[in-house]
Image (tube, rainbow, N blue to C red):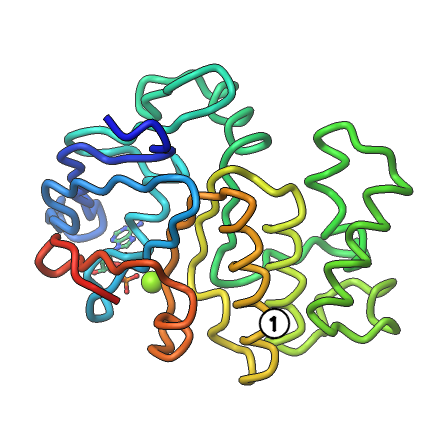
Amino acid sequence: MNPDLMIETRGLSKTFVLHQQHGARLAVLDGVDLAVARGECVALVGPSGTGKSTLLRCLYGNYLASGGEVRVRGDAGWTVLGEAAAREVLLLRRDTIGYVSQFLHVIPRVPALDIVAAPLRDRGVADGEARERAAVLLRALSLPERLWRLPPATFSGGEQQRVNIARGLIAEHPILLLDEPTASLDAANAERVAQLIDAARQRGAAIVGIFHDVAIRDRVASRCFSLTRATETAP
Ligand SMILES: Nc1ncnc2c1ncn2[C@@H]1O[C@H](COP(=O)(O)OP(=O)(O)O)[C@@H](O)[C@H]1O
Ligand SMILES: [Mg+2]
């Protein structure tokens, strides 16, 4: 086994049961074997609806596997997500797995700077230091400083997305899951995100991402994982 392996699925299947549709079953993932090591950035590719976001949610433990398993390497060794207690999954999310969802879940009245700093505070980093590191990231993503003290509810899509990315990257998790992190960004801001992804890889993060934009995908991915055929192809 690859000693640098950080996260893997073994025969992962996910079937949704649609209770509103008389229990109709929707088989989305079927026997997915994905293994991602330190320093890799694996891009999930496939047409819309093939289960890319579903796979990321399974890797984060948001969705439970219908078959097979998701294995994550944390500080204390390997955990099978489906067998872990809720508290264990929360600790893995605090310390090991970072997830940048497609859209920011805005918390009313909380300023952007504090939203970004929160994952560090959760890990016991002092307020001042957490805010300083949040400021460094927001500056790197060129979010105008006048916005830092405001809640992001009224921000533009691209501004919210940059807050979301900063929040997802600040704790420097060993595993990063990115769902279309550059979808609402212009070319210059997408490039800034690409540079942060490169930096995360260089510090040894294992990254799984969905990148709608092919140029960005080619720019950041070390390889592609195709969901239509569940085989690997060159980026
Ligand atoms: N919570 C859910 N309940 C029912 N169906 C879902 C759920 N999440 C995703 N799906 C379905 O799974 C399929 C794959 O969705 P998704 O993973 O979002 O695709 P992609 O990210 O590749 O575009 C879609 O048909 C979608 O409707
Ligand atoms: Mg998706």
Please state if 232 lies on the left or on the right of 148 as rendered. Answer: left
- In the rendering, at what x and y percent does residue 17 appear? 18, 43
Is 66 drawn above or below residue 32 in the view shown?
above
Residue at the far right in the pictured view: 128
Mark 1, residue position: 192
Where residue 131 sits: x, y (%)? 84, 49
Q: Is residue 38 left or right of residue 127?
A: left
In percent of width and height, residue 166 lies at 66, 57
Please tell me which residue is depicted at 73% across the width and 51% down the height of the picture: 115
Q: Which residue is drawn at 26% across and 39% down?
A: 35
Q: Where is residue 197 in the image (x, y as percent from the top left)?
A: 52, 59
In the displayed structure, would residue 180 be above or below residue 89?
below
Residue situated in front as seen by the camera: 13 or 165? 165
Seen from the viewer's position, the closer of residues 106 and 148 is 148
Tell me the quarter of the image containing the C terminus: bottom left
Q: Which residue is drawn at 25% across and 60% down?
A: 224
Amino acid of disc 1: Arg
